[in-house]
Image (cartoon, helix red, strand yellow):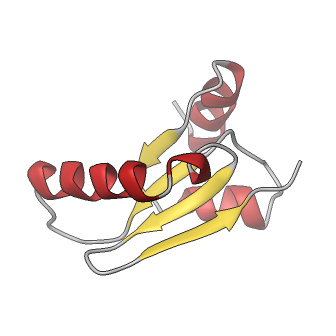
Amino acid sequence: MTDEDLLELANKEKRVLITNDKDFGELVFFQRRVGMGIILFRVKGQSTKEKVKLIRKLLMSYPEKVSRHFVVLTKNKIRIIPLGD
């Protein structure tokens, strides 16, 4: 399944896409393929346990900023960018 297909499926099913793939940033910002929401992990070699901690922190701190936003999670930072229509 291509990234474009995956983004289309997530939109169709009204799901937030969680990924390590930076290509989704290009799809959303340069190709204007808006998603329901994307969470991008930007830490190499990060364990699943650490990713769960970061997702939990995001959901506890900014629950309203997951849908219709592009969220970049790093070990020390959460960057949230609104997605246009």
Number of marks in the image?
0
Q: Quadrant of residue 42?
A: bottom left
- Residue at the spot x=51%, y=30% of the render? 1
Q: Quadrant of residue 2?
A: top right
Question: x, y percentage for residue 36?
Answer: 68, 39
Question: x, y percentage for residue 19?
Answer: 41, 49
- Residue at the spot x=63%, y=24% of the render? 9
- Residue at the spot x=16%, y=64% of the render? 46
Q: Is residue 63 left or right of residue 51?
A: right
Q: Is residue 29 left or right of residue 61?
A: right
Q: Residue 44 or 13: which is nearer the viewer? A: 13
Q: Residue furthest top?
A: 13
Q: Is residue 28 left or right of residue 22?
A: right
Q: Residue furthest front?
A: 61
Q: Is residue 39 left or right of residue 53?
A: right
Q: In the rendered view, tell whether residue 76 sits above or below residue 52.
A: below
Q: Residue furthest bottom?
A: 76
Question: x, y percentage for residue 56?
Answer: 29, 49
- Residue at the spot x=54%, y=37% of the render? 16
Q: Residue 20 or 85: which is nearer the viewer? A: 85
Q: In the rendered view, tell whether residue 3 sits above or below residue 58.
A: above
Question: x, y percentage for residue 11?
Answer: 69, 29
Q: Residue 63 or 66: which is nearer the viewer? A: 63
Q: In the rendered view, tell whether residue 63 sits above or below residue 79.
A: above
